[in-house]
Image (cartoon, helix red, strand yellow):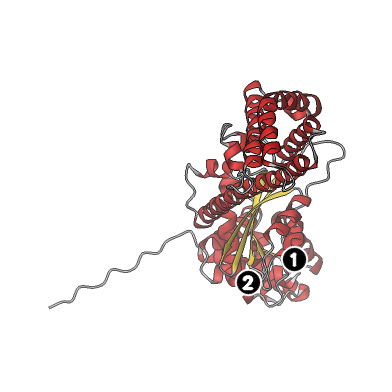
Amino acid sequence: MAGTSAADKAETLAWLRRISGDIATVTIKRLEDTLPWYADMPPARRSAVGLVAQAGITSFIQWYDDPTSTPWIAADIFAAAPRELLRSVSLQQTLQLIRVTVAVTEERVAGKGDDLREAILLYSRDVAFAAADVYARAAEARGLWDARLEALVVDSILTGGADEELPSRIAALGWHGHGEVAVLVGTTPPQFDVDQLRRTARKLDVDVLIGVQGSRLVLVVGRAEMAKGEDSPAELPFAEIAKRLEPGFGPGHLVLGPPVPALVDAGQSARAALAGFAVARAWRHAPRPVEADDLLPERALAGDPLAKHTLVERIYRPLQAHSTDLVTTLWSYLDNGRSLEATARELFVHPNTVRYRLKRVSEVIGWDATGPREALILQTALILGSIGTDTTRRRPKPRRPTG
């Protein structure tokens, strides 16, 4: 532009102002012909996009008049359109809009000299960068808001403070999980890559809410909604999902809470997972990840009422209701160091009878007494059931001093 005389530049500016309306009209027609997303827009939104294109052309003429003035800002151009336009038109579509506008302008000013064409190229570059900056700022603001809202939702789940606002907050986060939900608790890695963790979750067809609480990392995991069909993969158990998400956690124990029917019930899974995480170190050879229900004895010893209730209701009461012989056999088997012969002698039955009853125990409650870890779980359940955790004992009233 340095080689352009003042008179030539004034003449070019006057000519540009005369044809600016024609350029805008041709640009709108080109948008309709080449960009399907533009043609599919409602009339009001198409009009808003047209205002953006026209404002860009007008801004270029002003910039060409004085290139040293304040640089053109994309936000000023978008101010000519409704605020919703930024959310309804993607960055990719905005760049397509810029490309079409620049192409039409270049065609219209062809033959007016290299200086004008160079000015168009410089201006279009600044427009593209400014537009990207607008979208980046919007995305950053949205990301910060989502992160705060996500932390609030996870905290509500962990504290059991779920209220009537929780479903609306979940919806605002764009939660795609449907059906059962489980909570996974572990440690935060030194270099936490939240994006990588979300990518892994998407590959597993699950949605996650992530909460970082100092050194503790909490994931609320739910299966994402997907189209059902013959080629749809089978749903992975939560234990397998936890195993595949395990690399995203830091060193130490990783505890998976039991599945619950829906996200609004996730507090139950969270309480079990947190209680298990607090006592996981008491199991020397605990796997990673470990299910919270596999830590029921340690949780019960630590005073977790949920663990005590679970042991009694899922083990002691079903066995007692099914057959007292099963309870008696299990007691004797565990007291005799899991010896079939010693149990048979105590009960005056054949060892095969003991073996059969133990098999029935496993069928009724799902735990196998012949394994050392499950034997500990069953023995803890028998002790709690015999004590009667659901009964209360009255304290004796203190005697009044006499005399």
Q: Please, is residue 362 above or below residue 265 in the view? A: below
- Residue 184 appears in view: yes
Residue 26 drawn at (x, y percent): 75, 24
In front of the other: 104 or 284:
104
User: Of the numbered discs in the image, which one, if any, rests on residue 280?
Assistant: 2
Tell me which residue sits at (15%, 77%) in the image.
402
User: Considering only order in the chain, which callout, 2 or 1, is on the residue closer to the N terminus?
Assistant: 1
Farthest residue, direction right: 231
Q: Please, is residue 239 above or below residue 112 in the view? A: below
User: Of the numbered discs in the image, which one, if any, rests on residue 333?
Assistant: none
In front of the other: 69 or 344:
69
Q: Is residue 179 left or right of residue 80?
A: right
Q: Is residue 237 left or right of residue 335?
A: right
Task: Say what amino acid the circle numbered 2 marks.
Answer: Ala
Q: Which class describes the residues within 10 Å of circle 2: few (<14), some (14-19), or many (20+)?
A: many
Q: Which circle, 1 or 2, is nearer the viewer?
A: 1
User: Of the numbered discs in the image, which one, if any, rests on residue 247?
Assistant: 1
Asked where in the image residue 53 lies, by quadrant, the reply is: top right
Image quadrant where one finds the C terminus: bottom left
Tell me which residue sits at (78%, 28%) in the image.
36
Farthest residue, direction top: 43
